[in-house]
Amino acid sequence: MDTDLLNKVLKTVEKPTRYTGGELNMRVKSLVMENGEPRFRFALCFPDVYEIGMSHLGSRIVYNVLNERDDTYCERVYAPWFDMEKAMRENGIPIYSLETKTELDKFDIIGFSLLYEMCYTNILTVLDLAGIPFRSRERGESDPLIIAGGPCVCNPEPVADIMDVLVFGDGEEVMDELMDAYAESRKEGESRLQLLKRLSRIKGLYVPAFYKARYDAKGCFEGFDKLCVDAPDKIERRIVKDLDAAAYTGKLVVPYMSIVHDRVALEVFRGCTRGCRFCQAGFIYRPVRERSPQTVIDQADDSLDCTGYDEISVFSLSSGDYSHIHELVPIILDRYEKDRISVSLPSLRIDSFLKDDLEKIQKVRKTGLTFAPEAGTQRLRDVINKGVTEEDLLRSVHDAFVAGWHGVKLYFMIGLPTETDEDVLGIAELARKVSREFYSMPKELRGKGLRCTVSASTFVPKPFTPFQWEPQISVDEVLRRQALLRNALKGIRGVEFACHFSETSRLEAAFARGDRRLSEVLISAYKNGARLDSWDEHFNKPAWDDAFASEGLTVEQFANRRIRIDEPLAWRHMDAVVEHSYLVREHEKACSGETTRDCRKGCNGCFGRRAAEFCRIKEQEV
């Protein structure tokens, strides 16, 4: 790497600290071990810009896990912004790691985090800038092994022709197993094919090259043929059963610039017992596994001591459902009160009883409060199995207002299965009642004016949910319902409206439920100029339209089509542990508006015969 040229280029781009490295707690290692053997080089790549990738807790955990190994040096890579990509191409600068400024093609393994389908073209940006072939079959013995993990691996097929290996499930334990197998393969002098066969024998690792997709005469997906007799029929999701014993982040790397979540994140538990039928995370992170309060406090101490942060985020799918939440929040607040360290509780359920905790939190600093009713009427909340009522919402916001908050965010979705205009208008009516709740309070109690943000994203059907068979509504219908809601919200005091751009949601749905043919669509879109697609202002619709057309496919056939219950699914070879039959039953119950109880109140049988192996939830009243 020509560092003089790089420094010259960095002076010309926006936010150069995205590309410099050198941060506090950045891992620094020699490239050789004490015994003189070279360390394996692992480039951990988050396929979006630095400030988003640096906020991702999972990447921070993997970074620590790999660097705790003596034989491995894990370094970070992020996708460049448009100006940096242009400057790199013009000056012949390949993409590099932040720790040692090493070109990516010099690494043994490049690992991508797949959190969101709209980041897929950024993977190709990184590979392109590294001079690495896009397709797995085009890579040779000297090319890095390309792997990926994250929630999008639930349906890995749209990137199957690009990835050598995909990691399905929790990464804390399987990453060590992967590196052990890689080390043994290198020791034995195995070929790339032999290495892939070795890795395919590890539970949770998927090697797409060992499976060939099969289509019927009409081009509809039929299933897979195995090309390697030893490859597993199904790829079982890895589950870390004991979070107290699991690896965590270690010393957090502290950025020089502001990042999206610039604070200490404390994951108090993983999984969810509620069973919201639209929520992929609620199904693929089952069962619930909690960290003890002492483990959480110890991790808070360690993270604050090595970073200097002044805010803690109690992190989970629904932090109010943590069984020790009322014990943990006061302890943390009392422990760090003298240092003016604040606590935020994102992802609150509106039926969580947190009044006392909210009053304690606001004594230090009022952080953001977000509630997610998801739907505007009780009928639709029952369809999606949200398990909350209008009374729950109004009680929760009242408690927040009494505790001193005047800003809340309310999250909803447009286009949920069975939604009608009455349900859409119900969102506005709920916002109106929240506004009345605030302004009915005496002026001396409510303080500043209300800032209530109503956010309405577009429903995206996701694999391994009871709604995986449901279509997404058309773009025209999304825009019509957004306009209906926008007009209904006008004039409501203290309420503002925010909605997600429908074109990206449409593409997200296509890639969430797509098959292996979308790998070529993805490559074609990238060559057409698609970049950083999750940034709405830079979304290149013509590039994607042309890419789908060039492969004889349409977005609609993946995003807007109702899938038959008995139809082969492109992701059925992935075993998320939750039984397929359970998802079918939940779909049937949704169609009849029937709810399912929280599984803390009794097992609902989602794991089938494997319940004893995976689920440790005991029946209890909550």
Image (cartoon, rainbow, N blue to C red):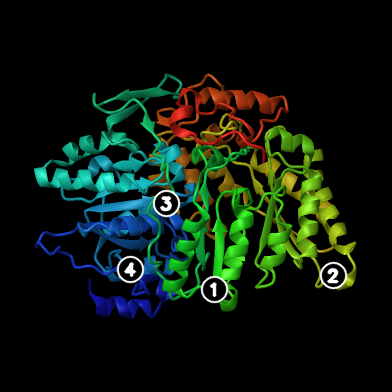
Q: Which residue is mark 3?
A: 121
| Dot 3 and dot 1 residues touching (CB under 8 Å) | no
Relative to residue 427, is residue 19 drawn left or right?
A: left
Question: Considering only order in the chain, which callout, 1 or 3, is on the residue closer to the N terminus?
Answer: 3
Element type at mark 1? loop
How many other residues sit within 10 Å of disc 1, few (<14), some (14-19) or many (≥20)?
some
Q: Along the line of sight, which residue is nearer the eye, 487 or 171?
A: 171
Q: Looking at the picture, which amino acid does disc 4 mark?
A: Met
Q: What residue do we see at 68% from left, 36% from top?
A: 384
Question: Real-space Cα distance between discs 4 and 2?
Answer: 56 Å
Relative to residue 356, is residue 168 drawn left or right?
A: left
How many other residues sit within 10 Å of disc 3, few (<14), some (14-19) or many (≥20)?
many
Element type at mark 4? helix
Element type at mark 3? helix
Q: Looking at the picture, which amino acid does disc 3 mark?
A: Thr
Question: Real-space Cα distance between discs 3 and 2?
Answer: 50 Å
Q: Which residue is mark 4?
A: 88
Question: Considering only order in the chain, which callout, 2 or 1, is on the residue closer to the N terminus?
Answer: 1
